[in-house]
Image: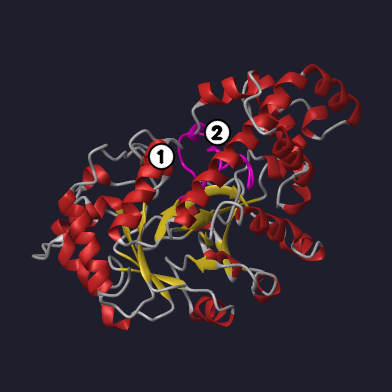
Amino acid sequence: MERGSGILLHITSLPNGILDKEAYKFIDFLQETGCKYWQILPLGIPVMGLSPYQCLSGKGSNYFLLDEDLVKKSYKEKEYNYENFKKFKKSNPWIFNFALFLSLKEFFNNTPWYQWPFEYRYKNKNRIQKIKLLLKEKIDFFIFREFFFRESWKNLKEYGNSKGIKIIGDIPIYVAHDSFDLWMNSNLFLISKKGTLLKKAGVPGDYFNKNGQLWGNPIYNWKIMEKNKFSWWITLLKDKLNFYDYIRIDHFRGFESYWSIPGKSIKANNGKWKKGPGKKLLKNFRKYPLIGEDLGIITDKVRTLLKESNIPGMEVFQFNENIQSYEKNKIVYSGTHDNMTLKEWLLLNNRVENNFQIIEKLFDSKSDVVIIPMQDYLNLGKEGRMNTPGTKENNWLWKMEKDYYSRDLIEKITQLNKKYKRG
């Protein structure tokens, strides 16, 4: 990656929390300050709550980030490029079943797919054909809505790229139990014939949470995925390049070995480490611009896998204050979406430095890329925290004020980029 700096700010943290003029204004802000990167969190549809790491689909886009009235108006009055719409449907054959899945979820009062009547859970052809006719209007709209999101994002990304801004986007390593991917491809996951989880994902206790984290996602059936030449993963990464210039894979260490928790367990620490697909999978990823999230319990084997795959990892100041040890091929953060804000961390640790003194030290590191959460530039305390791992309340809620772009802040970031040749 080109030497530079960027800002971590999810779409929901923009002043209006959606893809509107504020997203374009933020790109202008990035350009004016000399930044080169905008990092966001996953763009999938949250299953429940607001977490972007528990999504209804690996590919489906979060329509809550759209102006729903504008989508409906465009659909009703046919205010869109029909040729582009035709091309979208032709090049994305999965969209028809995805729209059917969303329609069925709505039809069954948003209950999880594994609680639907048996014939719909397992896609009985006759029943599915009949209900397709019944739900045709809804299916057609859901197809259009995905198209509308992708067109909106394409326009935003093109605008950002024209201003010299690259998008770094997250993808979760796992999908949710109640997801389109499991409904369509249950053989790729460790689940029972009834749809219950045989094993589920999480992590043991670490510096994020001493009791571990029970994520509850289904675990992949890596043997079947390998037989299929990892086509599910390859297709997913290809699709994400429509959204991002660089793809950050959350919990990358799960490719080397993953924490497997019994399906009925309610405690994260009851799991065991299991061997992941490792090089067999990653040799298929060589042409993709990836970043590996290598936080938590990281072993020499994980580090070796990253290095041999030529995938840059991460350094987070709150976990490693030895800035001199940061390697060139690393993405450096003051904190991530899972951390305290830098101000809160400094106060908790009785540090005398202020935010910008720490940020300047990170800019002075030899690492190619420095990413700073917007909350740290705004000098926010605990009121700006995005997520506290292992908790369910008061997460993913923070929004930026509309008057964030003060002249003083612009000049501070601009000077940092100039001084350390990151602009």
Within 10 Å of the Cα at label 2, are there few (<14), some (14-19), or many (20+) other Cα atoms? many
In this view, 28 is above or below 286? above
Q: Which amino acid is tagged 1?
A: Thr
Image location of residue 288, percent across then percent down: 62, 67
Q: How many marks?
A: 2
Q: Quadrant of residue 104?
A: top right
- Please, is residue 3 above or below residue 206 in the view? below
Horizontal and vertical percent for residue 200? 60, 51
The residue pinned by badge 2 equals 63
Residue plotted at (27% across, 37% down): 402
The image quarter containing residue 398 is top left
- Residue 42 x/y as whole percent: 51, 48
The percent coordinates of residue 83 (x first, y second) are 74, 37
Residue stretch rendered in magenta on the structure: 41-65
On whether residue 7 falls in the magenta region, the answer is: no
Residue appearing at x 24%, y 62% in the figure: 414
